[in-house]
Amino acid sequence: MPRTTVHRRRTTGLHSFGILKVPAWLCGEEDQDQNQREVNGFNCSIRPSIAMICLSDALTSAAIFSSIGVPLDVPLRTFAAGTLVLSFPTTWFTDSVARHCQAFGQSASRGGIMAEMMATAGAFCWLSFGTHLMSISHNAGQNAPLLFWNTFIQCTAAWSCLTFAMLTLIVSTVLTLSMGQKQ
């Protein structure tokens, strides 16, 4: 009886996020892997969110390349390149720190959380820097409109999400405290 070997393709980078994963029904495989779980609840938004981040990174890369050689009064290209560095490479970095800590017998979660906290603080400072650049720019909108509006939309969306998260946290805290005060 001949043995069949199943070879699984591995793609680097995005494979762990499941973006490049081909559905089993498309490959003609009838049975699902036993370790695959059904995605439900909050986890349903992970793959679309990562796909949206990939699209945003592609647009940012296109905006950077389209503005090469254009004179700008503020370093928007540097800011846009920094946002690309703070995307998937930072995720890889925090995962690498956690794996490194685990390999040397330290707490993987502690190292990963510290790396994630540093990355979050750096991203917040970088967002503030980008907002400052947008506010002092005089001619970037005319000289490099794709880069300018891409940066503007990213900064506005990030501040809107942060504001929404803070308001949700405050409202939920007030509701929890007011509901818990019954006597």
Image (tube, grey):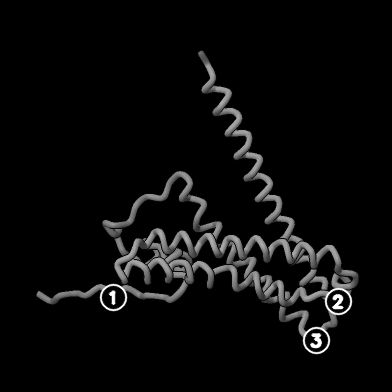
**Left or right: 134 in relation to 114:** right
In percent of width and height, residue 23 lies at 40, 62
Residue 148 appears in the rendering: yes
| Label number found at residue 7 | 1
How many numbered circles are shown? 3
In contact (CB < 8 Å): disc 1 and disc 3: no
Q: Amino acid at mark 2?
A: Asp
Q: Which quadrant of the structure image shows residue 4?
A: bottom left
Identify the residue under disc 3.
69
Q: Marks 3 and 2: which is nearer the front?
A: 2
Identify the residue under disc 2.
73
Residue 22 vs residue 35, the one in the foreground: 35
Seen at 66% across and 50% down, the residue is 161
Q: Amino acid at mark 3?
A: Gly
| Label number found at residue 49 | none
Q: Marks 2 and 1: which is nearer the front?
A: 2
Helix, strand or loop under label 2: loop
Residue 140 vs residue 10, the one in the foreground: 140
Residue 133 vs residue 151, the one in the foreground: 133
In percent of width and height, residue 109 lies at 39, 59
* Mark earlier in primary sequence (1, 3): 1
Label 3 crowd bin: few (<14), some (14–19), many (20+), radius 10 Å:
few
Residue 100 vs residue 12, the one in the foreground: 100
Residue 21 appears in the rendering: no
Seen at 52% across and 23% down, the residue is 180
In percent of width and height, residue 183 lies at 51, 13
Q: Which quadrant of the structure image shows residue 6?
A: bottom left
